[in-house]
Amino acid sequence: MSSPSSSGGSGNRSFPPPILLKIFNIIFTLVLTLLGLTAVTFIIGRVMPVDPVVAIVGDRASKEVYDAMFLELGLDKSILEQYFIFLKKTLHGDFGKSIGTARPVLDDLLHFFPATLELATIATFLGILFGVPMGVIAAVKQGKWIDHVVRVIGLFGYSVPIFWLALVGLLVFYARLEWLPGPGRIEVYYDGIVDPITGVILIDSAWQGEWEVFENAFSHLILPSLMLATFALAYIARMTRSFMLDQLSQEYVLTARVKGLSELSVIWRHAFRNVLVQLITIIGLTYASLLEGSVLTETVFSWPGIGQYITSSLFNADMNAVIGGTVVVGICFVGINMISDFLYKMVDPRTR
Amino acid sequence: MAEQYSTSENPIHRINAWLRSDAPDSIFQARCQRFYFNWLEFKSNPIALLGFLIILVLVLISIFAPWITGGDGLKQDLSQRLLPPSSKYWFGTDGFGRDIFDRIIWGSRITLFIVGLVGIIVVPIGMLIGTIAGYLGGWVDNVLMRFTDIFLAFPRLILALAFVSALGPGLGNAVLAIALTTWSPFARIARAETLTIRNAEHIMAAQVQGASTGRILLYHITPLCLSSMIVRLTLDMAGIILTAAGLGFLGLGAQPPLPEWGAMISAGRQFLVDQWWVATIPGIAILTVSMGFNLLGDGLRDVLDPRSGE
């Protein structure tokens, strides 16, 4: 994608100021998207072949119990009314009770979400750490062997099924070489030593000075986050490369070179600065997609995150849990995308 | 000019001259020429050609699966359980003593079925919404694109999961779920293309002749959107394959005993440590095919869509 050239015509001062209009527009889109998301998940909940009443009271319940629950769930009301009730409950964070854990879905989500967040954040960080320099180098050395290597790595990261790569990683580094620990978030005997304050074990253990726990949790994180980072790395490297190529062919880069600036300065202080702005969006997109993409990785590593919660609930026909999880992940996904979009518009003066 | 390419005796020379003539006599000739020159350009890109070959092999394998394997990939033989790769069983056997090579071959049909069906569902829907929005503009455009944006903003995998769980596990439902979460970028692209050609002279000519909106959309705008749709579809194929394999891996896609590659990986998990080939080989198949689609898509984009080339 080429950088959009700023369009003219919005130069005259008008009321309301364009920036307010833009913010209003973003909020409007956000609200609309979230409404759409809840509507779709609501519809999914309705077409589910499981009778929600039977799922709660069981199929041996008497007619009276069944009818009472039918009314309590509001199933006698019109679909639209039911949707508004669902929406209202969602706004209050009330997703009902999970059948699997017999606890409110919201509590479950709060319990499982930090694990996913930890995994996705570290994977995104790894993706940036390796992906950005790789992309820049590939662009600078376009057509050389290093460029080809980066492109092959990118292609691999794009094409590989992450869950399979994760299995192979477990096979090689855990089962064969025994370099890294196996599935799970932490060894059983370290379980419960650290009080879950944030739920992110790395932060909690460091905060409470339990370095042994920290080390164990860290070693458990290496393999899953590396595997999950494959896609982030490929995507970020590829986009960085193409953004950099875009910038390096611009005239200001030529000017900088003609002025006699060192190549390092031209690349990092001139071209890369402009790429940085575009990268914000890409990184936001990556983060959001890793949050949801961790579902499969979590399954492979028995990682007690939200993805595993959703998939295990799926098989128990635990409708409340599935819908609650989908809504929460969806909101995070939409939110991160909007924030990165907003940041992009704030940082890049050309889009104002 | 017309006689120029009919003089040579050698038929290959004549066809060649016919394809290279700079004054085509018919629409058919012009189309053949465009295809020919695109092919020449495509052929000069070895990486794209590699992708094309991978997909070609995939198609051939799935067509000739009965002759290649001599079975249906479902035959169990418990005395031959979990045998390592050998000259008899090239890729070894799985937990039910089935030949993994056979199952990989038969699985190619399922993979092609999934990507083909998703493509058939997604392209017309995206085209319909995108061209209508782009051509009519105004509030229609606004409403349709808001609707598209909502789907564009959704987390695809999670939503596909929820859809499949609602509809029930199975190959058909997996395809439907993937299609429901894949169509939105196609609508966006079709709209963008429509916007650029909406005011072209040939559209105006059609309008002046009194062509109906439907006719203009179908015969004058849709054909011009097709190439960018094909490029996008090819590039999306890898993602579709990976999502389908992921659903299969979770047990929500194709159901056993169907030889779906993702489900095969899932089945091989329990033998991972001692019989590595059961889970590993289907993954290599997925990787190869999705890589093939990515390479092919990149190559097609360079040929068909010069604007977005590097």
Image (cartoon, coloured by chain):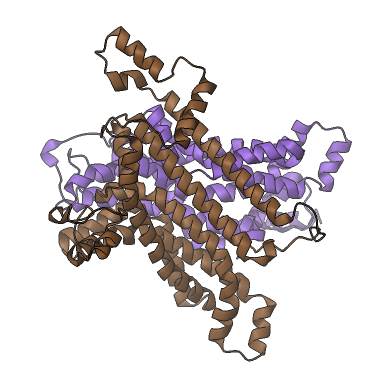
Task: Let me know if residue A22 appears in the view.
Answer: yes
Q: Nearer the viewer, residue B57 or A305?
A: A305
Relative to B74, B224 lies left or right: right
What residue is shown at x 54% (from left), y 47% (from top)?
B233
The residue positioned 68% from the left and 79% from the top of the image is: A252
Q: Position of residue A161 (x, y in %)?
A: 36, 52
Q: Quadrant of the C terminus of chain A?
A: bottom right
Hey, which quadrant is residue B270 in on the image?
top left
Q: Residue furthest right?
A: B208
Seen in the image, is B118 located left or right of residue B216? Answer: left
Residue A223: % across, % down:
27, 60
Whether residue A340 is situated above or below residue B248 in the rendered picture: below
At a point 27% along the width and 50% down the height, the residue shown is: A303
Q: Colour of chain A?
A: brown
Tell me, yes or no, if residue B105 can be seen here. no
Q: According to the rendering, which colour does chain B have?
A: purple
Instruction: Depth check: give the residue in front, B19 or B305.
Output: B305
